[in-house]
Image (tube, helix red, strand yellow):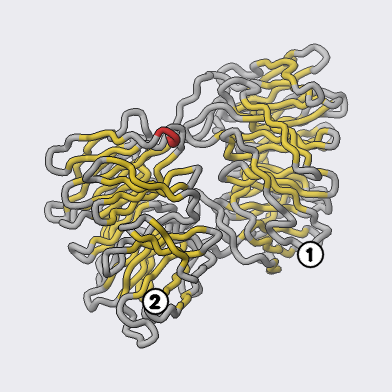
Amino acid sequence: MKHGLLALLMVLTVCALPGTSYADTGEENLGQPIANRILSQEQSQGVDADGRPQAYWVTAGNSYMNAMFQATDIRSGEVVFKQRVPDGGTDSWANTFSAADGTVYFAMTSGQMYRWKPGDAAITSLGTPFPGEGVWRLAAAPDGVVYGGTYPGGLLFSYDPGTGEFTDHGQIVPGETYGRALAVDDTSVYFGTQPRARLARFDRATGQVEQIPLPAEYGTSEVVYDMTRARDLLLLRVQPSNDLLFYDTAGKTFVNVVKGISARAVSTPDPTGKYVYFRIAADGIVQYDLDTHTYTPVGWGPNAFPGTWAWIELNDPDFPGRSLSMTYYYGRIYIWNPQTEKTRYLGESGLEGSANPIQAIGAGPGGEVYAGGFLSPPGISRFDPATGAYTLLSSGGQVEGFGRYGDHVVYGRYPNGELLDYDPAEPWTYGTNPAPVTIGEEQDRPQAFVQVGDRVAVGSVPKSGRLGGALTLWDPRTRALDVHRDVVPGQSVVSLATRDGLVYGGTSIHGGYGIDPAATSARLFVFDPVRGELVSSVVPVEGAHSVNALTVDAKGRIWGLADGHLFTYLPEAKRVTRAAALFPRQSSRYGADRALVFRGNDLYAAMAGSLWRIDVRTWKATALAGDGVSQLVTGGDGHLYFFRGTELFRRRL
């Protein structure tokens, strides 16, 4: 999912799973730091053959298990169907209910597509219609034809349930790689894109495409994320402003804007056809008058971002007529009746989740090990080496990288390049300890951290469709930021080290997703934080996509990893003194093979999915563990910690 939304602020302590020891390797499996995640990035709502309202989820899987399709009966709150996706796939951003045939269609970011009709005994696979293309949005037309948008080709396609045929309608907006939003009616498909927010209309009868320019102030927006049809209006939400734009499809003009809504989705019109509903953070749910273009809060404020809306019948005297049902991607359902103003909440407890893939790990000042998960709804998990217990710190979000600042933990959160400073000596209360501050300058993924004097240097990756990461000098105490974008033009900053007050940075040639790199080789640079100037930069390994990790030895030499190579850099000489291909060559987009750890004459590294020990006297590398080893930190017990997929491991030294 693209947003880390806030959960209730609390701290939960859970026991570690039983460790599995490997005496011959010294390796221990410490279990799953975030064991049960309910996350359905996209949802839909519909009805079964008897007209009972249902919600449909594709809860995310992980590297060990596929995603799971699940259906909830909204009247009873029971999960009435569940099945693991049969042909692979862990994540889905494409899920729609077709009223024409009473069928749910969903697809995976890895390209597989499926259908399920309430009452069916199993999911039906429709295959992988466009190999190499992930499906990122689906929408069903009134006549039952299902349309989809893809990445990285930015294709529009259609599926006809009557014939079982897929049709490729091509890249609708030239150069745009994501088909991110769809709205379909009898005659048209409206298509919204990323990494630049563009809007187009596809004529279903002729196949002609009409480009629809957004208002000038949205010319640099990044994505058209959601769209809803309401009478002759098309309602579209653009990011990063989250402004809701109203486009008159008959008059072909934009007629209104509501600034900064706090929602993914907007409801379809109510039974009168006069109102739609959406969420604004300060007001809760608001009722928007399609005639007067004004809105009024209704007094309902669910603590959730709407994922889908539906007008449903509950057959309950407290909920007469049609009620408004809203889903939230953590598996929750909120219901409100406009006549009685009664509300109902259905939690996620009946849904089956999966362990959260680990995104990043870091070491805390007390020797604890922190693990942040991918799109982590539960939060950050903290492992205590002394007790073997995990503590869940809620609302941590998707962590891109951890660092230290004195006796504090600092970390970077995706999206929007948020930086957070956490004092472990005080209670975890997300919003105050830690409280986020945003880098800005189109930065999205803060990857690398190192303390330099009374500030923290932060390396980051820009937003999708952008080149040009940043080196940011951040004072966590004052929250002041000094952002230096394009320190190495067109490259991101993914690894950092420091010596004698200077910052040493490693880059990746890649920017955000959806744009090709302009450079061919990653660089090692030297930056003076006092003067705010680049001192020098070199290419340590020709053709390497990223300088994955950096560290400084006792003699002041800089050691680094770059696409299967180990190298050394001598600051006094301002040159790379040695580089050798010691590992299988593997490119890491954002430097995921992080950290180099010294122990005497041995250097430990995570590279190409394995843990390695390198004798720095002979430069001989020995593989100690494989099977997808990622990242590397030292715990307070002096041992090494790394992860594979959803599980944390310890190697005793």
Residue at (36% x, 55% y) in the render = 293
Relative to 107, is 27 on the left or the right?
right
Quadrant in which residue 213 is drawn: top left
Determine which of the numbered discs, if any, sits on residue 320 in the image.
none
Which quadrant holds residue 560? Answer: top right
Expressed as whole percent of the image width and height from the top left, the position of residue 329 reads 46, 61
Front-most of 371 and 426? Answer: 426
What x and y, as percent, mark residue 390?
70, 63
Q: Residue visible at 26% across and 71% down? A: 118
Query: Is 514 above or below relative to 626?
Result: above
Q: Is residue 495 left or right of residue 531?
A: left
Answer with the quarter of the image where residue 598 lies. Answer: top right
* Extreme-front residue of the structure: 292
Type of amino acid at the residue the image marks with label 2: Asn
Q: Which of 551 and 162 is in front in this view?
A: 162
Vertical order, 318 against 66 (above or below): below
Assess whether mark 1 and mark 2 are in contact (beta carbons under 8 angstroms). no
- Residue 61 vs 491, above or below: the answer is below
Badge number at residue 387:
1
Q: Is residue 613 visible?
A: no
Residue positioned 78% across, 26% down in the render = 529
Q: Name the residue under label 2.
A: 337
The kind of secondary structure element at disc 1 is loop
Sequence-wise first label, 2 or 1: 2
Q: How many C-alpha atoms fall within 10 Å of the one at disc 1: few (<14), some, or many (≥20)?
A: few
Amino acid at the residue labelled 1: Thr
Q: x, y percentage for residue 500?
A: 86, 25
